[in-house]
Amino acid sequence: MELPKYHESFMPILETLKSEESLKSRELATIVRDNYYSDLPEELLTQKTSSGANVLLDRILWGKSYLKMGKFVSYPKRGLVQITDKGKKALEKGSLTLQDMQLDQDFINHRASVKTEKEDVIEVEKVEVESASPQDLIDSGFSTIEKEVKTELLEKLKELDPYYFEKVILILLKKMGYGDFIETSKSGDGGIDGIINEDKLGLEKIYTQAKRYNENKVREKDIRNFIGAMSGDTSKGVFITTSTFDDSAEKKAREAHHSIILIDGAKLVDLMHQYNVGVQVKTVYEVKELDNDFFEED
């Protein structure tokens, strides 16, 4: 006997949720374990990862995350999970495999919402375990986890109050090493959301504009208004959005006499992940190698 793979928990998770309005994530994983896998040997049920987490519960929680990517479940409130109409239809169908998930359009769109800078990264579900080196498997696993965190982060940003989103941007720029920042008035700011000092002494100023969009792209008009709102004391600006910029907006920024930096949703979560804004370290792994110098005789 062996532990189920994360994708083998798809149907048990949906079955568990179908009669519940919502469940806490940890409670859901425990119920699935007890109802579907209690016949496993004790040594499997208590098996731990190198960081001390229960392997089976961890895999069930990953199954839940993938179901969320495909919109088979949703998170109605913080920490809670509930089945969607799409999830109920999967139950009626009677099966949901990993291949089904990989071909699902919602899942594809979800994974595509955050681009990776590592174009040659192998997805963890596609990696050939027999032919991959241990380092390949580590890199693939870390890449998959990082991508999921960034995707969830982007979703969270799109749900924020617009004014709080503006503050998040200023906090990020501060963490990136810029100087003090000033939040502009929440009304009548003329398209300027914040002013940051490019250096610690405040010798140069940078204006910021933050647009929290779900689907709408930033247009040329938005960039034009931003440039028009910039006063004579600076020619530098950063325009940030949770969505993307259309071609005309990018062209306007490139051709402007001002220096305008555009940051779309994918780049934004890359920076937040890099500078630990809105995310935290969950686990630290140590990979050790033989210290040959230790065995050298003088």
Image (cartoon, rainbow, N blue to C red):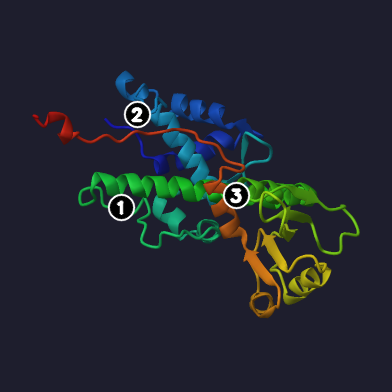
Q: Residues within 10 Å of mark 1 (few under 14, many from 20)?
A: some
Type of residue at label 2?
Answer: Ser
Relative placement, left or right, of 20 versus 100 is right
Alpha carbons under labels 3 and 1: distance apart: 35 Å
Q: Residue 55 sits in which quadrant?
A: top left
**Can you say whether 160 is above or below 297 in the image?**
below
Q: Earlier in the sequence, mark 2 or mark 1?
A: 2
The correct choice, above or below, for 285 with respect to 65 in the image is above
The dot on residue 198 is none
**Screen quadrant of the N terminus:** top left
Residue 71 in view (yes/no): no
Residue picked out by circle 2? 50
Q: Which residue is label 1 attached to?
A: 127
Q: Which residue is mark 3?
A: 176
Image position of 114 (left or right of 222): left
Q: Residues within 10 Å of mark 2 (few under 14, many from 20)?
A: few
Specify the quadrant of the image occupied by residue 25: top right
Three-letter code for the amino acid on which mark 3 is drawn: Met
Q: Residue at x 40, y 63 (%)?
A: 119
Disc 3 secondary structure class: loop
Q: Of marks 3 and 1, which one's residue comes earlier in the chain?
A: 1
Q: Nearer the viewer, residue 104 or 130?
A: 130
User: Which residue appears at 26% of the width and 52% of the height?
Assistant: 128
